Image (spheres, grey):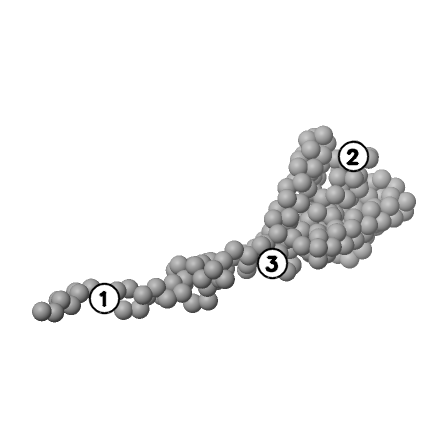
Amino acid sequence: MSEPASSELSVVDVRIGSTANALQPVSSAERSLGAGRVQWSVLAIVAGAAIVADQLTKQVVGRTLALGDSVDLVGPFSIHHVQNSGIAFGLFGSRTAIVIAVTAVAVGAMLVFFARSGRRHPVLPVALGLVLGGSVANLIDRVRLGHVTDFLDLVAWPAFNLADTFIVVGVAILFGALVIADRPHRMHGARGGHGSLHRR
């Protein structure tokens, strides 16, 4: 007598490109995203350059124009020497101590984020370097003087400085980079499932 054939065929789990232990698919293998020496170096260079550029332009404006004076350049754009004790674009102008504390916490949070995700996208060191440099540049003025010097004036917009510009540009680049970095992951998750194939 022969045994009856099994009504169910065995399922073979085929793993394509597994790790060294042959148990975890490469697609789900963890890759370190923490910042390395190169990422930290780029961050430091960009942040340092932003701080120097901001401080130099403030010094030039402070020595060239008296407080409140302005020089018309092109159309609505002018150089207008004003002082600001608030955050970017004059926000929270009467809360200097709070602004200093919030900025210090933000700088610390940025460094922690970069330490954990510095390799997530190639432009992260540049983007975060601009944000960090702009934040530190204004923080230096608030701690040292109790205010920052603003001089870029577009008439319909509150006066700002290079540090504010670096922060806005850096945040825009950072947001775009994170969106682009997450898109392939979401697409892979929708298509690839858990990374294993079944053959009947």
Real-space CA distance between mark 2 and mark 3, rounded to the nearest whole angstrom: 33 Å
Cα distance in 3D space between marks 1 and 3: 45 Å
Q: Nearer the viewer, mark 1 or mark 3?
A: 1
Q: Which element is circle 1 on?
A: loop
Residue at 61 percent of width and 48 percent of height: 116
* Sequence-first tag of 1 and 3: 1
**Residue 143 numbered tag:** 2
Answer with mark 2 or mark 3, whichever residue precedes in sequence.
3
Please state, as top left, top right, bottom left or bottom right, where the N terminus lies in the image: bottom left
- Amino acid identity at mark 2: Val
Q: Is residue 89 above or below residue 96?
A: below
Q: Disc 1 or 2, which lies upstream in sequence?
A: 1
Q: Which mark is residue 192?
A: none
Which residue occupies 71% across, 57% down?
38
Q: Which residue is mark 3?
A: 121
Which residue is at the far front?
1
Q: What is the number of the mark on residue 9?
A: 1
> What's under tag 1, amino acid-wise?
Leu
- Percent from the top left, x then y, of residue 70? 83, 46
Q: Position of residue 6 (x, y in %)?
A: 17, 65
Disc 2 crowd, CA 10 A, few/some/many (<14, 14-19, 20+): few
For label 3, the crowd category at 10 Å Cα-Cα, with few meaning under 14, some 14 to 19 and many 20 or more, is some
Q: For residue 8, what is the image quadrant? A: bottom left
Mark 1 residue crowding within 10 angstroms, few (<14) / some (14–19) / many (20+): few
